[in-house]
Amino acid sequence: MLRNKFTLLGVAAVLVGSSVGLATSASATTTLFNTSAASVQCGSIIAASASIAPPLSSASTGTATIKVKGTLGDCVSTGATVGGNPQEPTIVSGSFSGTLNTTGAPGCAGLLSPSTIAGNLVLKWKVASGQKLDFSSTTLSGGTITGGTFTGPLGNLYGQFTLAGQTFGPKSAFIGGTPSTVAATSEDVGQLGAGCLGAPPGPGIKTIHLALGVAIG
């Protein structure tokens, strides 16, 4: 009889433990954000680079393959909803990568002239714990890239590149905005020009580093 009581108590303990587990699981909900009408703006481009093949030089034909990668910071969403009600996710960070085939002016002038882009740029998003986007990434296709310059705080001129005219790929987050990116180079214009003309570490520019910028999706 005593043994049967202990058995019943053990079964009861197991059932109670299972109920607690179920209750804990049910309370751990995830908030799903709809970004179909939302846009995102990132104020920082961090540790980014663009590798160019063949290296950009005075002998370049105007076509190149550019592999880009980097991290995005200070990203803010606008226009997202949860269950039809306005609510914005907390974007912890973003990253981007892609292989872009560009066609533009030959020689060093290609740094400043508009070039057409074939290929995709993929941006991946990390949101706060307990949150989830309808899609975890944004794919941008095609468009153009145009070079220019901007003046740094000490008066030096730096390279500046603007991406525009891109289109959203399928299953992309934050498709409510107009894709555009403005990024500045770590190298100043003097270093870029010397590298393109074959000065050390030439010949040609193999890699450009991007330190500042704004990405808008």
Image (cartoon, helix red, strand yellow):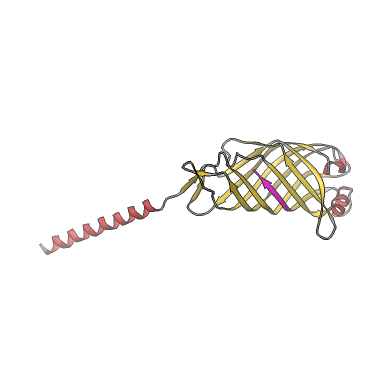
Residue closest to the eye, 206 or 70? 70
Report x, y in % for residue 13: 24, 60
Please state if 132 lies on the left or on the right of 140 as rendered: left
Please state if 44 lies on the left or on the right of 20 as rendered: right
Report x, y in % for residue 161: 77, 46
Q: Quadrant of the C terminus?
A: top right
Please state if 193 lies on the left or on the right of 183 as rendered: right
Residue closest to the eye, 76 or 94? 76
Residue depicted at x 68% and y 47%: 215
On screen, residue 145 above or below 70 = above
Q: Quadrant of the N terminus?
A: bottom left
**How many numbered tags mark residues here?**
0
Report x, y in % for residue 46: 68, 55
Residue furthest out toward the front: 85
On screen, residue 69 above or below 116 = below
Tell me the quarter of the picture where residue 53 sits.
top right
Q: Is residue 136 magenta?
A: no
Residue furthest out toward the left: 1
User: What secondary structure is the magenta-colored segment mainly?
Assistant: strand
Report x, y in % for residue 83: 46, 42
The span shown in magenta is 211-217
Residue closest to the eye, 104 or 172? 172
